[in-house]
Image (tube, rainbow, N blue to C red):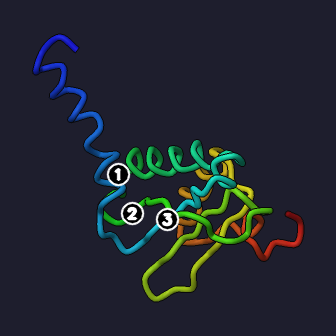
Amino acid sequence: MKSIEELMAIKAKMQDKVAVRTSSGDIRIVVGMATCGIAAGARPVLNAFVEGVSEAGISDKVTVSQTGCIGICQYEPVVEVFEKDKEKVTYVKMTAERAKEVIEKHIKGGKPVAEYTIGAATL
């Protein structure tokens, strides 16, 4: 970094990502980031949700955050989606690619991706 303008450009670029993590929207996406989740690949999943929500322009409606242990280590990475007046949806064995699909179908489309949920027959 060589100038204040460069610093301001970095700040502007990162502003959307910060807003996604702190907004108070109707939908909350929570990624389990305990050591078991991180070891299983939760960090790229968290990044995919943050970037996907920001790119979709829905950061005013959706908050992406992280939590510690969710308690189902064998299914990590685990993501929970909380929507106002709806039952929580728990996604298991998530990947960055699956996160993108969840954003499109569930977060934007309103239909949970059943085959990635904890209740799915084949995990």
Q: Residue at x 72, y 58 (%)?
A: 76
Q: Residue at x 62, y 45 (%)?
A: 96
**Above-or-below relation of 44 to 86:** above
Does label 2 or label 1 sit earlier along the sequence? 1
> What residue is disc 2 on?
63
* Apparent side of residue 93 relative to residue 59 in the rendered image (left or right): right
- The reply to whether discs 2 and 3 touch (Cβ–Cβ < 8 Å) is yes
Instruction: Please identify the residue farthest to the bottom as the structure is shown.
Output: 85
Q: Which mark is residue 57?
A: 1
Q: Where is residue 66 drawn, in percent x and y?
A: 48, 59
* Apparent side of residue 3 relative to residue 35 in the rendered image (left or right): left
Q: Where is residue 75 drawn, in percent x and y?
A: 77, 62
> What residue is disc 3 on?
29
The secondary element bearing badge 2 is classed as strand
Q: What kind of residue is marked 1? A: Gly
Q: Where is residue 11 drawn, in percent x and y?
A: 21, 34
Does label 2 or label 3 sit earlier along the sequence? 3
State how far apart marks 2 and 3 are (Cα).
6 Å
